[in-house]
Image (cartoon, rainbow, N blue to C red):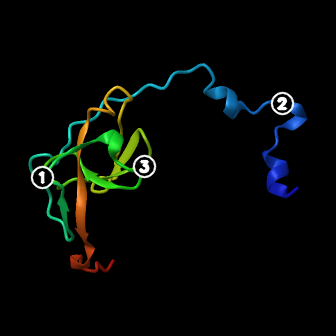
Amino acid sequence: MTDQQISDKPLNGQRSSIVNSRKGKKKEWKDLTIDPLSEGYDSHQADYVVGKNPITWALLEVGQLFSRSKSGKNLHIKLNDGRAICLDSRRPIEFRPTIRNSQQVWVVTNFNSTSASKVDY
């Protein structure tokens, strides 16, 4: 065993408190926040295009870029079945199970990051 494996084991046969901390607790889903860039948007260095028709959240694949608005100016990336993160504001969002099959999103179909200029810090 490595030192890390030994230190990760519970002492004296005790169960880990991490396992017990979530036991019996239900997940509390947060409502989706209003998309702050759904109407207006900030300018971006890169160009991207969203599809003409929306698809449901459930059909979106993990790692796929999407926008919550038809304008396509606020990009998100799907992390798993219930979560995504906004690339513009770095804020995570959650899709509760009751809306996953009905929530409409627009898939990014074309992304041109070559137009981004190098920023020196």
Question: With respect to residue 112, does 69 lie above or below?
Answer: above
Outermost residue on the top side: it is 24
Quarter of the picture holding the N terminus: bottom right
Q: In this view, does 26 lie to the left or right of 56?
A: right
Residue depicted at 18% across the width and 57% down the height: 50
- Helix, strand or loop at label 2? It is loop
Q: Residues within 10 Å of mark 3 (few under 14, many from 20)?
A: some
Q: Residue 87 at what x, y percent from top left?
A: 31, 56
**Residue 113 location in percent, x, y?**
26, 73
The residue identified by callout 1 is: 71
Mark in front: 1 vs 2: 1
Q: Residue at x 63, y 23 (%)?
A: 23
Disc 3 marks which residue? 79
Q: Which residue type does callout 3 highlight? A: Leu
Instruction: Indicate the position of residue 19 as horizontal and vertical percent values.
Output: 68, 31
Contact (CB < 8 A) between labels 2 and 3? no
Q: Looking at numbered disc 1 in the image, what kind of residue is underneath it?
A: Ser
Q: Which residue is drawn at 82% across and 42% down?
A: 9
1 or 3: tag closer to the N-terminus: 1
Q: Which of marks 2 and 3 is in front?
A: 3
Q: Quadrant of the C terminus?
A: bottom left
Question: Mark 3: which secondary structure?
Answer: loop
Mark 1 and mark 2 lie on one chain; the one further toward the N terminus is 2
Label ID, residue 14: 2
Q: Count all numbered tags in the image, as a single digit.
A: 3
Whole-angstrom CA distance, mark 2 to mark 3, is 34 Å
Res 48 label: none
Q: Measure the alpha-carbon separation of dots 1 and 3.
A: 22 Å
Cα separation between marks 1 and 2:
54 Å
